[in-house]
Amino acid sequence: MVELGLYQTRLKTALKQIVASAGQQFSTNDISEDERMLAAHPELASHSHYHAFVGGALSDHHVALDIAEVQKGTSRGSRWQKQG
């Protein structure tokens, strides 16, 4: 099992990199389907709630990522907008 601190560090690093390279608006699934996210968390990628986990992480870290949720419940998860 992956140590929680290492897991959180890998998650934050992957989120920052992927969000930085995303467009001004993006969906949760744009982030969760990115190869870097899948590589950072291969142990979760096949879980039935994987996309929800990533959406929760985006929500939990939205201030640090400088993003805001602009629409919930689309076919690709929430829509997010960069604030900066």
Image: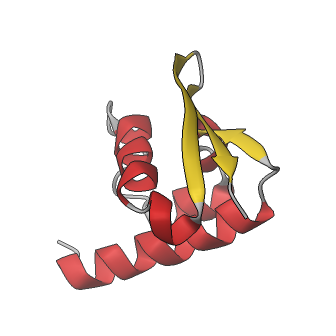
Residue 59 picture location, percent across and down: 40, 49
Residue 32 picture location, percent across and down: 55, 46
Q: Nearer the viewer, residue 2 or 4?
A: 4
Q: Where the N terminus falls, by quadrant?
A: bottom left
Q: Residue at x 58, y 15 (%)?
A: 75
Q: Residue at x 73, y 67 (%)?
A: 20
Q: Quadrant of residue 17?
A: bottom right
Q: Residue at x 67, y 61 (%)?
A: 19
Q: Nearer the viewer, residue 55 or 64?
A: 64
Q: Is residue 72 left or right of residue 19?
A: left
Q: Nearer the viewer, residue 70 or 22?
A: 70
Check the image and report above or below for 28 versus 36.
Answer: above
Tally of numbered tags: 0
Q: In this rendering, does residue 13 appear at all?
A: yes
Q: Nearer the viewer, residue 36 or 53?
A: 53
Q: Quadrant of residue 81?
A: top right
Q: Quadrant of residue 15?
A: bottom right
Residue 63 picture location, percent across and down: 47, 64
